[in-house]
Image: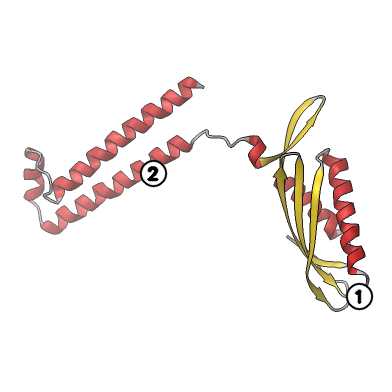
Amino acid sequence: MKSDKLRKTIVSFALIVFAAILLLFAACCWGIVELGGVIEYFESGNIAVRVLIGMLFVLLAVCVFYAVIQTVKLGKKKNPAEMNTLMQNNAGTSYISSDAVAGMIQRILKRNNKIKSANCTVNPVEDGIVSDVQLVVFSGGDLTKLCSDIQHQIKSEVETATGIPVRNVSVSIVQTVEGNTPVEKRVN
């Protein structure tokens, strides 16, 4: 691990030095800095050519700085507890992404013929997950019962499948539409 960090530091330092040299050459092209024979070589050419060469050096320096940023980012991992939902049992610790749980909830919602479309987000909390579900439903029928059934179904199925405690399921009906005709369901 330390050798990886040392390697990234050395590569980053070398790239920064290279970028600084490129910027120095750009300054020479534009006549801002004089470096002995370098400036004489650039002064002999057309001003437009000098400006273009200077811009090329600046572009190369920007690319090198970008490479430094990517090198520093390389290998950085987020804390699993921050980006994933935690599941612990006797065998050890597993991480399930929030997107995977959201996909599971979307499949649950897709099975309900009273729902035309839905949006779902899942967020990990310290001791489980919370889910926010927004629905477009067909009119007719008891909407409060529909919401309650969906909350219980999501809680039950997600907890059974993953072992993750579902702390809250917020269900919002954002729109009702007429009829219950067979349509292709859209669940996001």
Give amino acid for label 2.
Tyr
The quadrant the C terminus occupies is bottom right
Establish if 114 lies above or below 120: below
- Residue marked by disc 2: 66
Mark 1 vs mark 2, CA separation in Å: 57 Å
Crowding at label 2, few (<14), some or many (≥20) Cα neighbours within 10 Å?
few
Q: Which residue is drawn at 9% across and 52% down?
A: 45
Question: Could you say where residue 157 lies in the image, as x and y percent from the top left?
Answer: 88, 47
- Residue marked by disc 1: 140
Give amino acid for label 1.
Gly
Q: Can residue 113 be seen in this view?
A: no
Q: Residue at x 88, y 72 (%)?
A: 182
Q: Which residue is drawn at 49% across and 35% down?
A: 74
Question: Could you say where residue 15 lies in the image, as x and y percent from the top left?
Answer: 33, 35
Label 1 element class:
loop
Question: Could you say where residue 133 lies in the image, as x and y percent from the top left?
Answer: 77, 59
